[in-house]
DNA sequence: TCCCAGGGCTTGT
DNA sequence: ACAAGCCATGGG
């Protein structure tokens, strides 16, 4: 889904071809969703060279940090807490089917990600039936805050620390989830989400000793700079795909 | 059966 | 400020 529309893409050799849209929709919406206005060659060449990061870049050179819809990212990453990716995906799918608006595209019926109002009014038991577990209350609480006027998009222009602290006032949102929303939805390329895999890389591969989040964050900022979040995405995918432990 | 998963919250020191 | 327990759920 890009800007409320289903978008199909196909690979053709080195190219990615987007169908069913004119140039205006592509430039206004699709390009931003896939972060095409960021020149990744420049970003990646700006990282200080080291073996682990270079292996990560070689392993999956086409990775992009998406610009997802903020509310969708917020709820998805609240669900991600102490959870695994396959479960997260299936839970989000069930939320779409249960609470999202239906729409037709290419002769098929799809369900959009739910609006804040829909999840704010959800019943706890119904949310739990979607597999959310103890996070059901967090989902309702965060959705109510957004439905009642909290402007996630307005955080784009705030300083990083202020935006993060605003997000962590929401139930189920700590520093890690906040960093994910900032990086994957609000354009903060310096946000550095520290999940178990990234911590593993920092400690066991880079050999950084301190386990304190503030220290790891400083290490990342020092090592990767203003685009640390992009480095994080490459490292995360590489470590997880290769089960580096 | 136990352990783990893109953590956060609460309580105790 | 910091550490330890707890939390729903399902796959390995």
Image (cartoon, coloured by chain):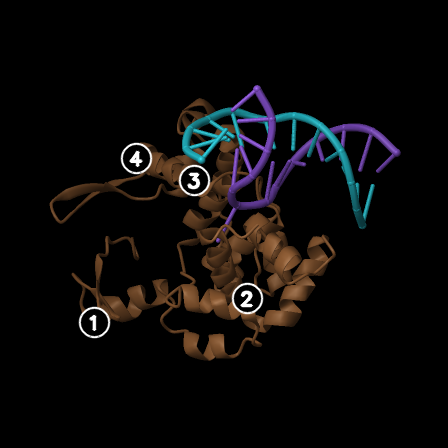
Chain colours: A brown, B purple, C cyan
SS for callout 3: helix
Residue A129 x/y as whole percent: 41, 25
Residue beneath label 3, please?
Answer: A88
Label disc, if present, on residue A52 of the rendered structure = 2
- The residues bearing labels 4 and 1 have C-alpha atoms spaced at a distance of 31 Å
Q: Nearer the viewer, residue A211 or A70?
A: A211
> Which badge, 4 or 1, comes first in the chain's sequence?
1
Tag 4, which chain?
A
In the rendered image of this protein, does residue A125 appear above or below residue A205?
above
In the rendered image of this protein, does residue A87 appear above or below residue A221?
above
> Which badge, 4 or 3, comes first in the chain's sequence?
3
Say if mark 3 contacts mark 2, CB within 8 Å: no
Residue beneath label 1, please?
Answer: A23
Q: Are marks 4 and 2 on the same chain?
A: yes
Tag 3, which chain?
A
Label disc, if present, on residue A97 of the rendered structure = 4
Say if mark 4 contacts mark 3, CB within 8 Å: no
Q: Could you tell me if residue A188 is visible in this image?
A: no
Label disc, if present, on residue A56 of the rendered structure = none
For the residues carrying marks 1 and 2, which lies nearer the camera in this image? 2
Tag 1, which chain?
A
SS for callout 2: helix
Quarter of the image holding residue A127? top left
Say if mark 4 contacts mark 2, CB within 8 Å: no
Q: Residues within 10 Å of mark 4 (few under 14, many from 20)?
A: some
SS for callout 4: helix
Residue A126 x/y as whole percent: 41, 25
Q: Are marks 3 and 2 on the same chain?
A: yes
In the rendered image of this protein, does residue A136 appear above or below residue A73?
above
Say if mark 1 contacts mark 3, CB within 8 Å: no
> Which badge, 1 or 3, comes first in the chain's sequence?
1
């Amino acid at each position: 889904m890009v800007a409320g529309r289903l978008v199909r893409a196909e690979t053709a050799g080195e190219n990615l071809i987007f169908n069913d849209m004119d140039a205006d929709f592509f430039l206004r919406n699709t390009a931003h969703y896939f972060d095409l206005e960021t020149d990744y060659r420049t970003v990646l060449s700006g990282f200080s060279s080291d073996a682990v990061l270079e292996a990560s870049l070689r392993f999956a050179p086409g990775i992009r940090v998406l610009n997802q819809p903020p509310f969708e990212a917020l709820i998805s990453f609240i669900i991600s807490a102490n959870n695994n990716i396959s479960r997260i995906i299936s839970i989000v799918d069930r939320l779409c089917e249960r609470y999202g608006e239906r729409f037709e595209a290419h002769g098929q019926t799809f369900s959009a990600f739910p609006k804040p109002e829909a999840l704010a009014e959800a019943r706890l038991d119904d949310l739990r039936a979607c597999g959310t577990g103890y996070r059901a209350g967090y989902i309702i609480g965060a959705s109510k805050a957004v439905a009642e006027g909290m402007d996630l998009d307005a955080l784009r222009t705030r300083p990083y620390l202020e935006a993060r602290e605003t997000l962590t006032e929401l139930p189920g949102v700590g520093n890690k989830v906040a960093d994910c929303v900032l990086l994957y939805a609000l354009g903060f390329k310096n946000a550095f989400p520290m999940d178990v895999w990234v911590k593993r890389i920092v400690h066991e591969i880079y050999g950084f000793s301190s386990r304190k989040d503030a220290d790891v964050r400083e290490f990342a900022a020092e090592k990767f700079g203003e685009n640390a979040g992009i480095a994080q995405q490459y490292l995360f995918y590489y470590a997880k795909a290769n089960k580096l432990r």
